[in-house]
Image (tube, rainbow, N blue to C red):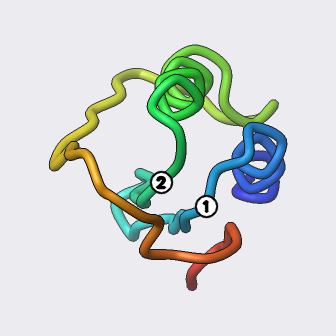
């Protein structure tokens, strides 16, 4: 469930969005302090929501930014 991902992101002080895909995967974008982004990646890779089954986690297009480009943490539909 995406609300768990939102809650985790907010607790870590991150901004971004997540979305379920038709293929049964989750995509999204996360921004914030590098150490908190890394913590979020670990959470997404190992824990996720209580009902999720994580078989693989892939993180792409990673880059440093000077300032946040997103506000809040939202679920997209």
- Identity of the residue drawn at 57% across and 85% down: 77
Q: Where residue 55 sits: x, y (%)?
A: 41, 21
Instruction: Find residue 37 and report its horizontal and vertical position in percent.
Output: 50, 34
Where in the figure is residue 50, as x and y percent of width and height?
81, 31
- Vertical side of 10 occupied by 34: above or below: above
Contact (Cβ within 8 Å) of mark 2 with mark 1: yes
Q: Which residue is the site of mark 1?
A: 15
Residue at (74, 38) in percent of width and height: 12
Residue farthest toward the left in the current orientation of the protein: 61
Of callouts 2 and 1, which one flags the residue occurring earlier in the amino acid sequence? 1
Between marks 2 and 1, how big is the CA–CA gap? Answer: 5 Å
Indicate left or right for 41 with 39 as reference: left
Image position, residue 38 (x, y; %):
47, 24
Residue at x 70%, y 73% (from the top left corner): 72
Tell me, for residue 31, which label it has, or none.
Answer: 2
The quadrant holding residue 8 is top right
The residue positioned 25% from the left and 46% from the top of the image is 64
């Amino acid at each position: 469930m995406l609300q768990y991902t939102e809650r985790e992101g907010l607790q870590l002080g991150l901004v971004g969005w997540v979305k379920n895909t038709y293929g049964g995967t989750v995509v999204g974008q996360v921004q914030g302090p590098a150490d908190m982004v890394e913590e979020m990646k670990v959470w997404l890779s190992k824990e996720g929501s209580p009902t999720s089954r994580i078989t693989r986690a892939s993180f792409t297009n990673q880059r440093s930014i000077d300032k946040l480009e997103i506000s809040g943490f939202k679920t997209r539909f």
